[in-house]
Image (cartoon, rainbow, N blue to C red):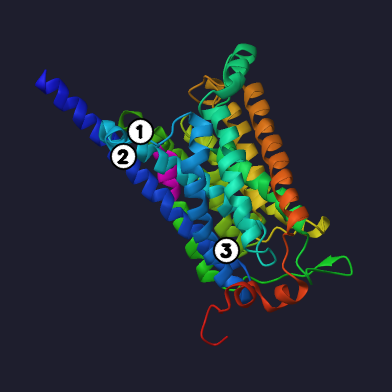
Amino acid sequence: MDITSAVHTLTESANTLFILIGAIMVLAMHAGFAFLEVGTVRHKNQVNALVKIMTDFGISAVAYFFVGYYLAYGNHFLSSASELTTGNGYELVKFFFLMTFAAAIPAIVSGGIAERAKFYPMLVASGLIVALVYPFFEGLIWNGNFGFQGWLESQFGASFHDFAGSVVVHAVGGWIALAAVLLLGARNGRYRNGKVVAFAPSNIPFLALGAWILTVGWFGFNVMSAQTLDGISGLVAVNSLMAMVGGVLVSMVLGRKDPGFIHNGPLAGLVAVCAGSDLMHPVGALITGGVAGALFVYLFEWAQAKIERLDDVLGVWPLHGVCGVWGGVAAGIFGLEALGGLGGVSLMAQLIGSLAGVVVAFVGGLVVYGVIKAIVGLRLSEEEEFNGADVSIHRIGATSLE
């Protein structure tokens, strides 16, 4: 009996440590979001990029702790500390892990709305998104809420499969961002005589650093989505690697060696492989990542040139929104046994689940940002935008030279 108890305690401790390491790795990814945005925006908006990621994370943690996690999973933490530490506090660390996923939503949105958004209205929007919109879909998919997954399984033989959040996290974040970007409109001076004016990234090394931090942290994002040590899979790690490589190589070729495309290419591949990383053959993951790299390059260039209101600074709609949807669909293709996968997926269920994520995210984003726009507005004034968000909002520039 003592041996059994000791083994059980050791297992609980190991699982708690496992998911804690994952939470810390995903937490580190937020530095990646920050530096990717810092390197991409113009110099006069670098401080704002850093501050947004940090404060959005703080708001997200509070919103998810008190509302979002309960809405998604029906569990809360308003009990005594002795109850919360049952099982080595595994449930607390699970919250920490999933909260870092939830906080990625405002971090994704931040890249799309950069350089012209007000500070506090966007912070309020982040809290509402993480408290209400994101956990609604998260619970629908990852906790079986409202019978949606059961319905898919009864109709198509399998529920919607999204192992690490291609749709639940990335597509949802990208389509919420699209709503915010469209409501904000383009940055001043971005279009002249119907043609797009390129705003060059302010710091390619920072952009590259952000991409690398995200890439490394992503292996915690994907592999640790098993949430217990006995569920860890080398297949998830290698599939993540292959999708990343596919994204790099395709974006290098199609993006004509542009460093912005090359450093976003691995992120596109990793977004897409999240859903099926536990099912695909590595060759399927390589193809999935390559297609995602192509989607990002083509859609980023098309959107910037053809849709004037869609001034998506970091390209978060194609990168997270579209590549996330592709990842949901790809899991239903390359997860099939006929294509070397482990099976247990339905392409129709993957299509419907992915579409549901788009609808919930886009409509939710329109409602949240639309209401805030109507009440207090979303944009800086023309003068504030010209001066830059750093000086206009934070009263300080990125360097002492300003």
Quarter where residue 222 is shown: top left
User: Residue 104 appears at what percent x and percent y?
Assistant: 53, 49
Tell me if mark 3 has few (under 14), some (14-19) or many (20+) residues whose alpha carbon lies within 10 angstroms of its own. many
Q: Earlier in the sequence, mark 2 or mark 3?
A: 2
Residue sitting farthest toward the bottom? 401
Which residue is identified by label 3? 37
Check whether the beta carbons of the residues at disc 2 and disc 1 lie within 8 A of each other. Answer: yes
Q: At numbered mark 1, what does the secondary structure look like: helix, strand or loop? A: loop
Name which residue lies at 65% across and 44% down: 321
Q: Is residue 2 above or below residue 32?
A: above
Residue topped by disc 2: 18
| Mark 1 and mark 3 residues within 8 Å of each other at the beta carbon | no
Q: Residue at x 73, y 44 (%)?
A: 367
**Badge 1 local density, few (<14 within 10 Å), some, or many (20+)?**
some
Q: Residue at x 53, y 78 (%)?
A: 398
Evaluate whether residue 151 shows in this view: yes
* Residue extent of the magenta highlight: 217-224
Mark 2 residue crowding within 10 angstroms, few (<14) / some (14–19) / many (20+): many
Mark 3: amino acid: Glu
Question: What residue does disc 1 label?
Answer: 232
